[in-house]
Image: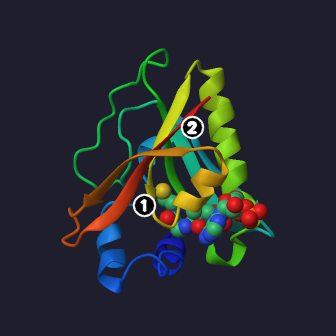
Amino acid sequence: MDASIGELQKPFLDARQIDASRSIMGLDTQLIDDGTYFVVETDGGIAGCGGWSRRATLYGGDQTPGRSPVPLDPANDPARVRAMYTHPLHVRKGVGRLILSLCEETARSEGFKSIELMATLAGEPLYRACGYEPCERIVDDRGGVGVPLVRMRKQL
Ligand SMILES: CC(C)(COP(=O)(O)OP(=O)(O)OC[C@H]1O[C@@H](n2cnc3c(N)ncnc32)[C@H](O)[C@@H]1OP(=O)(O)O)[C@@H](O)C(=O)NCCC(=O)NCCS
């Protein structure tokens, strides 16, 4: 995650924005406790990770304020895609696409009709390629510097 955040956002954010983004990204251990987080391994190392959630929090790591464990209603609420990171040595090999498909399949099997996420600019091309459409652009300045983000959604 650290390498992914530090390296892969360089084409989109300046150094201060990358630093600031660390306060609103990273692992939410609730996803591991819920059993909705995937790790893709290759040759004994981690190639990437990411997951989904049936809880209200849209994005953020354990250190991010304002997270909510409130359960979503599959009939009315979109499920969440959360914390997608591919190691810089393993980008463009389909790791992100694989994790997204696992997330969508599992969320669909639990009755969710749509799925939503808050994308970084580095993540937006992956999500567009996988059928997600932007619905809102925001700037999160909780890390001290504004970090642009885009809310995206897909029907399941
Ligand atoms: C976003 C991220 C997870 C993508 O992971 P990935 O494993 O490289 O993605 P995939 O190999 O599955 O890509 C699938 C498709 O998405 C699109 N895509 C992915 N990364 C892209 C990029 N940097 N530029 C353009 N298109 C891209 C392409 O269409 C790609 O298919 P192709 O390689 O056959 O052309 C990775 O870049 C990353 O970790 N970024 C930094 C952390 C981050 O911002 N995470 C998102 C949080 S919301």
Assign the C terminus to one quadrant of the image: top right
Determine whether 74 is above or below 44 in the image. above
- Which numbered mark, 1 or 2, is in the foreground of this view? 1
Please tell me how crowded label 2 is: few (under 14), some (14-19), or many (20+) other residues with Cα within 10 Å.
Answer: few
User: What secondary structure is marked by label 2?
Assistant: loop
User: Residue 2 has which mark?
Assistant: none
Q: CA distance from mark 1 to mark 2?
A: 17 Å
Q: Position of residue 20 (x, y in %)?
A: 29, 72
Q: Circle 2 sits on which residue? A: 35
Q: How is the image coloured?
A: rainbow
Q: Amino acid at mark 2?
A: Gly
Q: Amino acid at mark 1?
A: Gly
Q: Position of residue 139 (x, y in %)?
A: 27, 60
Q: Residue at x 53, y 61 (%)?
A: 123
Q: Position of residue 103 (x, y in %)?
A: 62, 39
Please tell me how crowded label 1 is: few (under 14), some (14-19), or many (20+) other residues with Cα within 10 Å.
Answer: many
Res. 66 visible in picture: yes
Ligand 1 quadrant assignment: bottom right
Q: Residue at x 28, y 43 (%)?
A: 67
* Near-viewer residue (111 or 71): 111
User: What secondary structure is marked by label 1?
Assistant: loop
Name the residue furthest right: 43
